[in-house]
Each structure stands twice: as C-alpha cells, then as structure tokens.
Amino acid sequence: MTPIRLKISAPKPDGIPEPNIGIGGMFQRFTWLNGASNYAFVYILRAGDTNSYKVGFARDVEQRILTLQTGSADKLVVVKDYWLPDVGLAIRAEKAAHRRFEPWRLHGEWFRLTNDIAIIGVSLEIRETIKQPAIDGAAWREYSNEVHRQVRELNEPLDHRKMQMASGWI
C-alpha cells in the first residue's frame, strides 16, 4: 500500500495517531495506526438545568444520548467528552470516575456534581488511567472528519490519475 499525504487543516490533538492512508486496489483505504480503530469516548452528560450528571463511555456519543434521551424527562446535554484510543481504557477511566464521585452518587451512573467538578474529576481519572492528558472529543472529531472528508474526495469520483499523483506515482 502506497502512503498518501493529506493536508489536514484541522489541528491534530496530541496523542492521536497519524492516519494511515494508501492506495489498495480500486479504492483508498483509511485506518488509524496503533490500534486506534478500537477507540471510544468517555462522556459527561447533564440532565437539563439540574446538577445531575452521568459519566459513561460509548463508541458513538450522539447515538448513546439518543438512546438515553428516550428514558429521560430532562433534555440531556453533553458537557464534555474525551477520546481514548481503546475501549478497555475508556471502561477503566469511566469506572475510576465513578469511584471518585461515589460520595455524590444519586443512583446508577448519575451523580450530584457541578460542571467544573465533573470535568476536572473525569479528566484526572483519564490522565491517571492512560498516563497522558485527556484528548478533547470535539477536537478529535474535527480532525477525524477532516481526514475522512479528504479520503472521500480522493475516492469520489474514482480518478486513478488523481490517486497516482497524490501517492507520488506520477
């Protein structure tokens, strides 16, 4: 597979692996290096204007909110989410945050907190779990979306000359 260099305008957050893009057969293949295709997010949700916060993990935070929203009378709002390179690390960080917030547990994964305490507590647990700073989920999505957009542009329409030029073949 011949590597292709993309010109990404979105800043790449520290700790995110470089995209691995190359020509393989009739189309572009795109993967994250270092096992990052197994990524997940640890998120903090707030129920409406209350001090009720949920700390959880998901591969797709937006889909998770839709699922949770059907059982909630309050509008659920994402306070913050963090990208982690591995689902197992996300689970460990989520459980560590639950232990940190145990004195303020309302029920299940819901806690009586403030925005600042929730954000600081979760980011500290992520840092302690993965031994590096937490990566902002919004920054990761911006960078990832830009990479995916450029890969789609290389694929649509499938222009072999364009792909050959991008890969340095011609």
Image (cartoon, grey):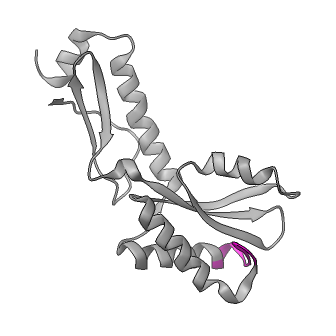
Q: Classify residue 54 as left or right of residue 58.
A: right
Relative horizontal placement of residue 110, taking residue 11 as reference (left or right) = right
* Residue, far right: 73
Q: Residue at x 48, y 65 (%)?
A: 90
Residue drawn at point x = 23 percent, y = 10 percent: 160
Q: Compare residues 74 and 107 and report the one nearer the observer.
A: 107
Residue 98 in magenta? Answer: no
Quadrant where the C terminus lies?
A: top left
Foreground residue among 114 and 107:
107
Residue 143, quarter of the rendered image: top left
Residue 152 in the image, given as x and y percentages of width and height? 40, 23
| Left-right relation of 103 to 6 | right
In the picture, the quarter occupied by the N terminus is top left
- Assess whether residue 110 is covered by the magenta stretch: yes
Q: Residue at x 52, y 79 (%)?
A: 96
Vertically, is 73 above or below 125?
above
Image position of 68 with respect to 164: above or below = below
Query: Is 48 or 99 nearer to us in this picture?
Result: 99
Please, is residue 13 above or below residue 26 in the view?
below
Give the residue at the far bottom of this rendering. 103
Q: Quadrant of residue 102?
A: bottom right
The region drawn magenta spans: 107-117
Residue 43 rendering spot, x and y as whole percentages: 59, 62
